[in-house]
Image (cartoon, helix red, strand yellow):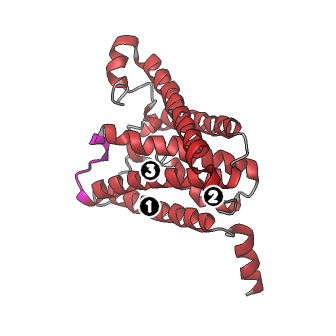
Amino acid sequence: MKALRTFREKYFPSFSDRLFFLCGLLMLCSEIWKQYMLTFPLGGGAYNWWYFPFQLCSIPMYILAAYPWLRRPGIRRTLLAFLMCYTLLGGIAVFADTSGLHYAYAPLTVHSYLWHCLLILLGILSGFVYFRSFENENTLCAFAGSTGLYLICCAAAEVFNLTFDRFGEINMFYINPDYRMQQIVFRDLSLVIGNLPAILLYIAVTVLGAFLLLLAWRLLFGLLLRRILRRDP
Protein backbone atom coordinates (compact mmCIF):
# COMPACT_ATOMS: atom_id res chain seq x y z
CA MET A 1 0.00 0.00 0.00
CA LYS A 2 2.83 2.38 0.81
CA ALA A 3 4.50 1.67 -2.54
CA LEU A 4 1.21 2.30 -4.33
CA ARG A 5 0.71 5.54 -2.43
CA THR A 6 4.25 6.65 -3.25
CA PHE A 7 3.69 5.79 -6.93
CA ARG A 8 0.48 7.83 -7.01
CA GLU A 9 2.06 10.77 -5.22
CA LYS A 10 4.97 10.75 -7.68
CA TYR A 11 3.13 10.33 -10.98
CA PHE A 12 -0.53 11.18 -10.28
CA PRO A 13 -0.47 13.84 -7.53
CA SER A 14 -3.14 16.05 -9.10
CA PHE A 15 -6.55 15.60 -10.64
CA SER A 16 -5.26 16.87 -13.99
CA ASP A 17 -2.59 14.13 -14.07
CA ARG A 18 -5.20 11.45 -13.57
CA LEU A 19 -7.70 12.97 -15.98
CA PHE A 20 -5.16 13.49 -18.77
CA PHE A 21 -3.87 9.93 -18.43
CA LEU A 22 -7.38 8.50 -18.39
CA CYS A 23 -8.27 10.45 -21.53
CA GLY A 24 -5.07 9.26 -23.18
CA LEU A 25 -5.90 5.63 -22.43
CA LEU A 26 -9.49 6.12 -23.61
CA MET A 27 -8.29 7.65 -26.86
CA LEU A 28 -5.72 4.90 -27.36
CA CYS A 29 -8.28 2.14 -26.84
CA SER A 30 -10.77 3.81 -29.17
CA GLU A 31 -8.05 4.24 -31.79
CA ILE A 32 -7.20 0.53 -31.59
CA TRP A 33 -10.90 -0.23 -32.13
CA LYS A 34 -11.00 2.18 -35.09
CA GLN A 35 -7.94 0.62 -36.71
CA TYR A 36 -9.39 -2.87 -36.21
CA MET A 37 -12.72 -1.92 -37.76
CA LEU A 38 -11.10 -0.21 -40.75
CA THR A 39 -8.67 -3.07 -41.34
CA PHE A 40 -10.78 -6.20 -40.85
CA PRO A 41 -14.60 -5.77 -40.93
CA LEU A 42 -14.43 -2.91 -43.44
CA GLY A 43 -11.06 -3.46 -45.12
CA GLY A 44 -11.09 -7.21 -45.58
CA GLY A 45 -7.76 -7.57 -43.78
CA ALA A 46 -5.89 -5.00 -45.91
CA TYR A 47 -4.46 -2.12 -43.89
CA ASN A 48 -5.31 1.35 -45.20
CA TRP A 49 -2.33 3.64 -44.60
CA TRP A 50 -4.57 6.67 -45.08
CA TYR A 51 -5.85 6.09 -41.55
CA PHE A 52 -2.47 5.61 -39.89
CA PRO A 53 -2.83 7.43 -36.52
CA PHE A 54 -0.37 10.25 -36.99
CA GLN A 55 -2.37 13.39 -37.75
CA LEU A 56 -2.37 16.64 -35.81
CA CYS A 57 -5.53 15.44 -34.07
CA SER A 58 -3.84 12.13 -33.17
CA ILE A 59 -0.82 13.62 -31.39
CA PRO A 60 -2.75 14.46 -28.16
CA MET A 61 -3.40 10.74 -27.67
CA TYR A 62 0.34 10.13 -27.34
CA ILE A 63 0.94 13.26 -25.28
CA LEU A 64 -1.77 12.44 -22.75
CA ALA A 65 -0.63 8.83 -22.35
CA ALA A 66 2.92 10.05 -21.61
CA TYR A 67 2.00 13.16 -19.60
CA PRO A 68 2.05 11.72 -16.03
CA TRP A 69 5.52 10.24 -16.54
CA LEU A 70 7.07 13.50 -17.77
CA ARG A 71 7.64 15.50 -14.61
CA ARG A 72 10.13 18.20 -15.68
CA PRO A 73 8.37 21.60 -15.59
CA GLY A 74 9.84 22.71 -18.93
CA ILE A 75 8.52 19.63 -20.72
CA ARG A 76 5.12 20.00 -19.08
CA ARG A 77 4.87 23.64 -20.12
CA THR A 78 5.63 22.65 -23.71
CA LEU A 79 3.07 19.85 -23.75
CA LEU A 80 0.36 21.96 -22.14
CA ALA A 81 1.07 24.80 -24.58
CA PHE A 82 0.75 22.33 -27.46
CA LEU A 83 -2.57 21.05 -26.14
CA MET A 84 -4.05 24.47 -25.44
CA CYS A 85 -2.96 25.95 -28.77
CA TYR A 86 -2.36 23.34 -31.49
CA THR A 87 -4.78 20.71 -30.19
CA LEU A 88 -7.51 23.27 -29.57
CA LEU A 89 -6.91 24.71 -33.04
CA GLY A 90 -7.12 21.28 -34.66
CA GLY A 91 -10.28 20.41 -32.76
CA ILE A 92 -12.00 23.62 -33.81
CA ALA A 93 -10.74 23.84 -37.40
CA VAL A 94 -12.04 20.41 -38.40
CA PHE A 95 -15.61 21.67 -38.05
CA ALA A 96 -15.00 24.13 -40.89
CA ASP A 97 -15.09 21.09 -43.19
CA THR A 98 -16.54 17.95 -41.62
CA SER A 99 -16.28 15.76 -44.72
CA GLY A 100 -13.25 14.00 -43.26
CA LEU A 101 -15.24 12.97 -40.20
CA HIS A 102 -17.71 10.82 -42.10
CA TYR A 103 -17.35 7.08 -42.69
CA ALA A 104 -19.52 4.45 -44.33
CA TYR A 105 -19.84 2.84 -40.88
CA ALA A 106 -21.91 5.12 -38.61
CA PRO A 107 -20.13 4.27 -35.29
CA LEU A 108 -16.83 5.46 -36.82
CA THR A 109 -18.48 8.75 -37.76
CA VAL A 110 -19.74 9.14 -34.19
CA HIS A 111 -16.25 8.31 -32.94
CA SER A 112 -14.72 11.04 -35.13
CA TYR A 113 -17.11 13.70 -33.90
CA LEU A 114 -16.65 12.70 -30.26
CA TRP A 115 -12.87 12.60 -30.71
CA HIS A 116 -12.70 16.18 -31.98
CA CYS A 117 -15.14 17.46 -29.38
CA LEU A 118 -12.88 15.88 -26.76
CA LEU A 119 -9.89 17.66 -28.31
CA ILE A 120 -11.63 20.99 -27.81
CA LEU A 121 -12.44 20.19 -24.19
CA LEU A 122 -8.89 18.99 -23.54
CA GLY A 123 -7.47 22.11 -25.15
CA ILE A 124 -9.58 24.30 -22.87
CA LEU A 125 -8.71 22.25 -19.79
CA SER A 126 -5.01 22.40 -20.67
CA GLY A 127 -5.17 26.18 -20.81
CA PHE A 128 -6.60 26.31 -17.30
CA VAL A 129 -4.03 23.83 -16.00
CA TYR A 130 -1.19 25.75 -17.65
CA PHE A 131 -2.11 29.13 -16.22
CA ARG A 132 -2.87 27.73 -12.79
CA SER A 133 0.49 25.94 -12.68
CA PHE A 134 2.75 28.33 -14.61
CA GLU A 135 0.97 31.70 -14.61
CA ASN A 136 4.20 33.58 -13.92
CA GLU A 137 6.25 31.70 -16.52
CA ASN A 138 7.10 33.01 -19.99
CA THR A 139 4.31 31.71 -22.22
CA LEU A 140 6.23 32.67 -25.36
CA CYS A 141 9.00 30.23 -24.46
CA ALA A 142 6.44 27.49 -23.89
CA PHE A 143 4.77 28.33 -27.20
CA ALA A 144 8.12 28.24 -28.99
CA GLY A 145 8.68 24.75 -27.56
CA SER A 146 5.21 23.62 -28.63
CA THR A 147 5.82 25.03 -32.12
CA GLY A 148 9.08 23.11 -32.27
CA LEU A 149 7.13 19.99 -31.32
CA TYR A 150 4.58 20.71 -34.04
CA LEU A 151 7.29 21.16 -36.67
CA ILE A 152 9.01 17.95 -35.56
CA CYS A 153 5.68 16.17 -35.96
CA CYS A 154 5.33 17.69 -39.44
CA ALA A 155 8.79 16.40 -40.36
CA ALA A 156 7.96 12.95 -38.96
CA ALA A 157 4.68 12.96 -40.88
CA GLU A 158 6.54 13.72 -44.10
CA VAL A 159 8.93 10.84 -43.40
CA PHE A 160 5.91 8.56 -42.95
CA ASN A 161 4.37 9.92 -46.16
CA LEU A 162 7.44 9.36 -48.29
CA THR A 163 8.35 6.03 -46.70
CA PHE A 164 4.97 4.31 -46.81
CA ASP A 165 3.71 5.89 -50.03
CA ARG A 166 4.72 2.72 -51.88
CA PHE A 167 2.31 0.61 -49.81
CA GLY A 168 -0.81 2.68 -50.46
CA GLU A 169 -2.35 6.13 -50.05
CA ILE A 170 -0.99 8.01 -47.05
CA ASN A 171 -1.23 11.71 -46.26
CA MET A 172 -0.17 12.39 -42.68
CA PHE A 173 -0.79 15.99 -41.57
CA TYR A 174 -2.18 16.50 -45.10
CA ILE A 175 1.25 17.60 -46.34
CA ASN A 176 2.19 14.75 -48.68
CA PRO A 177 3.49 16.53 -51.83
CA ASP A 178 2.27 13.59 -53.94
CA TYR A 179 -1.35 14.63 -53.26
CA ARG A 180 -3.03 17.93 -53.98
CA MET A 181 -3.72 19.90 -50.82
CA GLN A 182 -7.08 18.85 -49.38
CA GLN A 183 -7.65 21.35 -46.59
CA ILE A 184 -10.38 23.90 -47.17
CA VAL A 185 -9.11 27.20 -48.70
CA PHE A 186 -5.63 25.76 -49.25
CA ARG A 187 -6.87 23.27 -51.83
CA ASP A 188 -8.06 26.22 -53.91
CA LEU A 189 -4.84 28.13 -53.31
CA SER A 190 -2.82 25.14 -54.51
CA LEU A 191 -4.32 25.62 -57.98
CA VAL A 192 -3.01 29.19 -58.04
CA ILE A 193 0.36 29.08 -56.25
CA GLY A 194 1.23 25.40 -56.61
CA ASN A 195 0.89 22.44 -54.25
CA LEU A 196 4.18 22.70 -52.36
CA PRO A 197 3.82 26.44 -51.62
CA ALA A 198 0.25 25.73 -50.45
CA ILE A 199 1.56 23.05 -48.09
CA LEU A 200 4.20 25.40 -46.66
CA LEU A 201 1.61 28.16 -46.32
CA TYR A 202 -0.73 25.74 -44.54
CA ILE A 203 1.97 24.92 -41.99
CA ALA A 204 2.74 28.62 -41.47
CA VAL A 205 -0.94 29.52 -41.06
CA THR A 206 -1.34 26.69 -38.52
CA VAL A 207 1.47 28.19 -36.46
CA LEU A 208 -0.13 31.63 -36.78
CA GLY A 209 -3.52 30.26 -35.72
CA ALA A 210 -1.99 28.58 -32.68
CA PHE A 211 -0.20 31.84 -31.79
CA LEU A 212 -3.48 33.76 -31.98
CA LEU A 213 -5.00 31.24 -29.57
CA LEU A 214 -2.05 31.83 -27.24
CA LEU A 215 -2.75 35.58 -27.32
CA ALA A 216 -6.41 34.84 -26.56
CA TRP A 217 -5.39 32.70 -23.58
CA ARG A 218 -3.07 35.43 -22.25
CA LEU A 219 -5.79 38.04 -22.65
CA LEU A 220 -8.35 35.82 -20.92
CA PHE A 221 -6.21 35.02 -17.92
CA GLY A 222 -4.49 38.38 -17.79
CA LEU A 223 -7.68 40.40 -17.67
CA LEU A 224 -10.29 38.14 -16.13
CA LEU A 225 -9.08 35.10 -14.27
CA ARG A 226 -5.56 35.53 -12.91
CA ARG A 227 -6.75 36.89 -9.56
CA ILE A 228 -9.08 33.97 -8.84
CA LEU A 229 -6.79 31.10 -9.88
CA ARG A 230 -4.79 29.17 -7.36
CA ARG A 231 -1.46 27.47 -7.79
CA ASP A 232 -2.39 23.86 -7.02
CA PRO A 233 -4.17 22.34 -10.06
Q: Residue at x 50, y 45 (%)?
A: 87
Q: Nearer the viewer's eye, disc 3 or disc 1?
A: 3
Query: Residue 13: which quarter of the image?
Result: bottom right
Assess disc 2: are there few (<14), some (14-19) or many (≥20) residues with their C-alpha within 10 Å of its C-alpha: some
Amino acid beneath label 1: Ile
Task: Say if the magenta span includes residue 128.
Answer: no
Query: Which residue is under mark 3?
Result: 120
Task: Say if the magenta span includes residue 103.
Answer: yes
Residue that sits furthest to the bottom in the current view: 1
Q: CA distance from mark 3 to mark 1?
A: 21 Å
Q: Residue at x 59, y 40 (%)?
A: 218
Query: Where, quadrant-wise, is the C terminus in this rendering?
Result: bottom right
Query: Residue 152: which quarter of the image?
Result: top right
> Where in the figure is residue 138, as x and y percent of width and height?
72, 39
Residue that sits furthest to the top in the current view: 192
Contact, mark 1 vs mark 2 (Cβ under 8 Å): no
> Where in the figure is residue 162, as x and y percent of width and height?
50, 32
**Dot 1 or dot 2, earlier in sequence:** 1
**Dot 3 or dot 1, earlier in sequence:** 1
Assess disc 1: are there few (<14), some (14-19) or many (≥20) residues with their C-alpha within 10 Å of its C-alpha: few
Q: CA distance from mark 1 to mark 2?
A: 17 Å
Instruction: Give the vertical position of 218 relative to 184 (above or below).
Output: below
Amino acid beneath label 3: Ile
Contact, mark 3 vs mark 1 (Cβ under 8 Å): no
Q: Residue at x 35, y 53 (%)?
A: 112
Q: Nearer the viewer, residue 161 or 54?
A: 54
> Where in the figure is residue 33, as x and y percent of width and height?
39, 63
Query: Which residue is under mark 2?
Result: 66
Instruction: Give the vertical position of 78 relative to 192 (above or below).
Output: below
Query: Which residue is under mark 1?
Result: 32
- The boundaries of the magenta stretch are 98-106
